[in-house]
């Protein structure tokens, strides 16, 4: 299992302890804290030099876990369902750019809220639109050797694909179960939506391609009520070797997060080594 933290390259995010201007300092901290890589928030590619970003990662011996892509929904209205066709096409075009960048960086590409917000009343139609929008992207990713990770997100943020099971069902039944699409399992959302962490891990199987680490309240682990030990033992036992990436608020404080990330990762590594 590998570990990463969030760094943002263009717009600020509450999920990083570092501002856009300090992204290289963020990479230094990740290296010093014993993380294996960085999850990069990228909105668009205007003026963004991906080989130069890769060089900064390489210099520090860091990988890139995934590209976090959701900022473009709020900033530009990009979306894969429930929007006019030209918006879907523009979003697909952006995803092809993300996949090209991911091929250079050796990372995955996230589909989070950019799937659309949907509604209970229009769910069938929304998912049919998402299917149509994602099929060519899954093909493109396959050709480029990149994995797209579809995130299960809680009901208060979207009506679509709230549970690990719903995300797996969608990939299997609607997308034809391609190797190029897996699931991003976010422990904050999972705590709200999944029946149990254990049952979700069993359902996810090899579809589990990325984990977001946050406590029940989206604080740094240990400051909410999620019991992380059985979750990490469970995914280690299931053979998970991909990235688990911190996506929590700078809470209870940024100082605590910065000081405790390294020791927390060490403790999980020690625990899962015994599995
Ligand atoms: C993104 O990874 C996520 O988990 C969403 O809740 C962002 O709002
Ligand atoms: Mn997440």
Image (cartoon, rainbow, N blue to C red):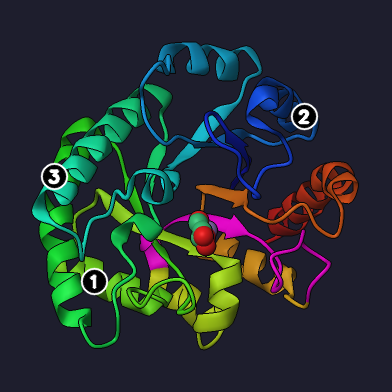
In contact (CB < 8 Å): disc 1 and disc 3: no
Percent position of residue 176, x then y: 13, 63
Q: Give the residue displayed 56% in from the left and 64% down from the top.
A: 235
Percent position of residue 105, x then y: 42, 25
Q: Is residue 150 visible?
A: no
> Which tag, 2 or 3, sits closer to the chain's start?
2
Q: Where 234 falls versus 15 (above or below)?
A: below
> Which tag, 1 or 3, sits closer to the chain's start?
3
Q: Give the residue displayed 70% in from the left and 24% down from the top.
A: 22
In contact (CB < 8 Å): disc 1 and disc 2: no
Q: Where 54 falls versus 244 (above or below)?
A: above
Q: What is the quadrant of the C terminus in the image?
A: bottom right
Helix, strand or loop at label 1? It is helix
Label 1 crowding class (10 Å Cα cut-off): few <14, some 14-19, many 20+? some
Percent position of residue 60, x then y: 66, 17
Judge whether residue 8 is colored magenta.
no
Residue at label 2? 29
Residue at label 1? 170
What is the C-alpha distance between the residues marked 2 and 3? 38 Å
Label 2 crowding class (10 Å Cα cut-off): few <14, some 14-19, many 20+? some
Helix, strand or loop at label 3? It is helix
Q: Where 210 falls versus 57 (above or below)?
A: below
Q: Is residue 116 visible?
A: yes
Q: Mark 2 or 3, which is nearer the eye?
A: 3
Q: Is residue 50 left or right of residue 253?
A: left
Residue at label 3? 89
Q: Where 248 falls versus 191 (above or below)?
A: above
Helix, strand or loop at label 2? It is helix
Residues 49 and 78: in front is 78
Q: Which residues are magenta?
A: 205-224
């Amino acid at each position: 299992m590998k570990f990463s933290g969030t760094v943002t390259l263009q717009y600020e995010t509450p999920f990083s302890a570092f501002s856009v201007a300090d992204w290289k300092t963020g990479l230094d901290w990740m290296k010093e804290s014993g993380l294996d890589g960085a999850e990069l928030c990228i909105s668009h590619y205007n003026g963004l030099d991906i080989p130069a970003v890769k060089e900064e990662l390489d210099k520090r011996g860091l990988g890139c876990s995934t590209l976090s892509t959701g900022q473009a929904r709020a900033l530009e209205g990009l979306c894969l369902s429930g929007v006019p066709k030209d918006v879907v096409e523009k979003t697909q075009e952006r995803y092809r750019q993300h996949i090209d960048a991911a091929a250079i960086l050796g990372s995955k590409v996230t589909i989070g809220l950019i799937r659309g917000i949907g509604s209970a009343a229009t769910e069938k139609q929304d998912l049919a639109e998402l299917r149509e929008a994602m099929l060519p992207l899954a093909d493109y990713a396959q050709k480029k050797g990149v994995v797209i990770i579809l995130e299960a997100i809680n009901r208060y943020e979207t009506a679509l694909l709230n549970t690990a099971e719903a995300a797996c069902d969608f990939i299997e039944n609607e997308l034809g179960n391609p190797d190029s699409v897996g699931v991003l399992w976010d422990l904050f959302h999972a705590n709200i939506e999944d029946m149990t962490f254990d049952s979700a891990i069993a359902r996810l199987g090899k579809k589990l391609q990325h984990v977001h680490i946050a406590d029940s309240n989206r604080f740094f682990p240990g400051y909410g009520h999620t019991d992380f030990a059985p979750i990490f033992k469970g995914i280690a036992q299931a053979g998970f070797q991909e990235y688990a990436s911190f996506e929590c608020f700078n809470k209870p404080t940024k100082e605590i997060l910065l000081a405790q990330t390294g020791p927390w990762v060490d403790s999980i590594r020690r625990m899962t080594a015994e599995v």
